[in-house]
Amino acid sequence: MCSPHGVVKEFEDLKAEVERLAGSTGAAEYARILRQHGVERPRQFRITQPVRLCAKDVYLLLEELRSNARENQREMEPDSERSTGGDRDDSTTGVIYDDGTDDDSNENLHHLRTGR
């Protein structure tokens, strides 16, 4: 980003990514940030300090948009993918005895033996 051409190229890349993530709303926010730094287009910058500050603000916007996109992606995942329970059968209490049976099978066995 040392040359004027490099500045324009970097800002074009940032703008494209912002638009990809947020569409026309992102483009409007990008334009607002440029105006906040006193220009309508990146090639209008004359000294490097404002360029860097503006690029930083656009980059922070981009990071926020990426974070929002990741969060939205997680919200759209089916519940089965988000759960950590795996294939566990919730019909048992989860206690497995030495003979390989669980609470429910031992309870059923007890009913068969005692009739209760």
Image (cartoon, grey):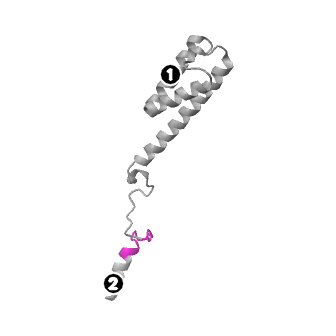
**Who comes first in sequence, dot 1 or dot 2?**
1
What SS does tag 2 mark?
A: helix
Q: Quadrant of the N terminus?
A: top right
Q: Residue at x 38, y 50 (%)?
A: 78
Mark 2: amino acid: His
| Residue 75, horizontal then vertical, whole percent | 43, 48
Q: Residue at x 55, y 28 (%)?
A: 32
- In this view, the residue in front, 57 or 90, is 57
Mark 2, residue position: 111
Span highlighted in magenta in the image: 93-105
Q: Is any atom of residue 21 visible in this view?
A: no
Q: Quadrant of the C terminus?
A: bottom left
Mark 1, residue position: 13
Question: Alpha-carbon neighbours of circle 2 within 10 Å: few (<14), some, or many (≥20)?
Answer: few
Q: Is residue 40 above or below residue 60?
A: above
What SS does tag 1 mark?
A: helix
Give the image quarter of residue 98.
bottom left
Q: Is residue 102 magenta?
A: yes
Q: Is residue 50 above or below residue 81?
A: above
